[in-house]
Image (cartoon, grey):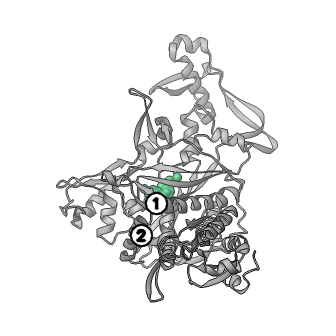
Amino acid sequence: MTEDATEKLVELAKRRGFFFPTAGSYGGVAGFYTFGPEGASVKSNVEEAWRRRFTTQEGHAEIDAPTVMPEPVFEASGHLETFDDMLVECAECGASHRADHVVEDDTDIEEAESIPIPEVEEIIREHDLRCPTCGTPLADRPVEEFNLMFETTIGPGTGRPGYLRPETAQGIFVEFPRLSEYARNQLPFGVTQIGRAYRNEISPRKSIIRVREFTQAELELFYDPEEDDPDLSGVRDRTVRLYPVAEQEREDGTPYETTVGEAVDEGTIASPWIAYYLGIAAEWYESLGVDVDRFRYRQHLAGERAHYASDCWDAETELGGDWVELAGFATRGNYDLSKHDEHSEDRYTVFKQYDEPRTVERATVDPDMSYLGPEYGGRAGAIADALEDLAERDRSAFEGDSVTVEVDGETHEIPVEHTGFAVEEVTETGEHVVPHVVEPSFGVGRLVYTLLEHAYREDVVDGEERTYLELEPAVAPTFAGVFPLTDEAGLPDLAREVAADLRAAGLSVTYDDSGNIGRRYRRQDEVGTPFCVTVDHDSLEDGAATVRDRDTTEQVRVPIEDLPGALAALRDGEATFDELAADPQAFG
Ligand code: GAP
């Protein structure tokens, strides 16, 4: 799609109520968009399709957590310290820009996010890059880390600091102890969430592609890396286009097609869980109408990965000539649960039962408090705890005459004879392990945009130019438009009856009696309504109506009493329009 067509799509989206800048009457605010009736409908269809595929069909559980969480959650998760983008500010006009985007837009360098800040500053100097807003050189401007989280205060007065979640994932991780109980502590299990996330993007752009408030659909799959593997049989033969790190780093490297099975066997995709999700997601995206020729999976370069990920593959799609990330599939290891285990008062582990009980050696301490008390006063308890911790971690520390522990930044030398150190044999039936996580994380708004852009068509019908959206029935805002051909007595009433019957059959239907019939067809084509039903003068006589196919504009007469069954069959993929044309009563 050309830039020109992208502009036409954004104009159509605004005019027909798919999405538009929020609070336009007040000048708007960058990075916030409202989905109008048509867009909200596509969005909710996408969310429902995601829920069916990634929650229901996978047998996972869905939760709904708050969007604001207290600061300690994000201290533990690492977002407070590292959830940053590179900011460069123009000295002349004061505009803020993402330094990596300035580099990507004005040089041949790709994925500049993975380049360290000093090198980005160097590139800006060397290429004499300029402020995209006013054209002033940025050469001497510092590039700084900018934290993307929106801060707030919880409660009145000074309150407690809190943050709007930058990913829905943390709402799942913090509840792991309860969610694990719900799953009867049996790995593997998955938890999903569809909800809002917030990022104070430095330069929101490309309408709803990069915004400050957006919807994510995320799945956290908790598993034991030593025991649990996915069943790849259903996805092994699925063809995927991959762009692994090795290809990105080769001068003439390109994305290539392979199957999920081959990519796992050859080690291109290291995690079978990631491979599994890439396989089912490719099929799911295609089923919703993403153009497979404009779709690929690209592996993150080392410097590009988020602080929690050891590997990540992005689903990317081509939009207006650029490749845009639709979803990320990250190997998060035990990073998140270990951090919450460390920082909170709960345990973020599951008890893993051994097949047979095992006899193991365990190092213990029984500190002599009659020595520690007088010697260390109020710190004696903390020192005893530190000794216990050290014995578990490093029993060799107790091999000499004294052992060193650190409490509140101070080191203490304790004679080993007062620690009660011993190594004993115990029989254990299992152990507490911190589960690992893989995470498919989808952006909903970006997918809505992609479906519209990939479905955008222009053609000529009866000598007139037409714009239509070739949306899949599963995501189209409305499934059928119902019209009376004219306002002749009896026709509007009959058309309303038809609309009511179709709605009662669970179809989403719009009724329209304004303007000539050609205009009404165009209006529905433009918002992607797959079928239109028109009742005319003959309908009063023969009890049949005309069903029109959006893409071909072909028409067929179907008995009104058979319409609910026929249209439901078209929606559910049980019939094609050609089959209906061949036998209009077959699906009633
Ligand atoms: N929990 C992992 C995570 O949040 P991410 O790659 O940062 O991963 C996942 O985000 C998806 O959310 C992206 O692939 C994208 O579709 C969407 N997304 C991220 N930032 C966005 C933004 N500023 N505007 C719109 N969508 C965004």
Amino acid identity at mark 2 = Leu
Q: Which residue is denoted by mark 1 in the rendering?
A: 302
Mark 2 surroundings: few (<14), some (14-19) or many (≥20) residues within 10 A:
some
Which of the numbered marks, if any, corresponds to residue 328? none
Foreground of the two, 491 or 217: 491
Q: Residue at x 53, y 35 (%)?
A: 343
Query: Is residue 467 depicted above or below 167 in this figure?
Result: below
Foreground of the two, 239 or 126: 239
Q: Residue at x 62, y 16 (%)?
A: 368
Q: Identify the residue at the far bottom of this view.
A: 463
Q: Which residue is denoted by mark 2 in the rendering?
A: 12
Foreground of the two, 158 or 567: 567
Q: Residue at x 67, y 66 (%)?
A: 502
> At which x and y percent is residue 407?
49, 25
Mark 1 surroundings: few (<14), some (14-19) or many (≥20) residues within 10 A:
some
208 with respect to 288 (left or right)? left
Amino acid identity at mark 1 = Ala
> At which x and y percent is residue 340?
56, 39
Between marks 2 and 1, how big is the CA–CA gap? 39 Å
Q: Helix, strand or loop at disc 1?
A: helix
> Within the image, what quadrant is residue 581 found in?
bottom right
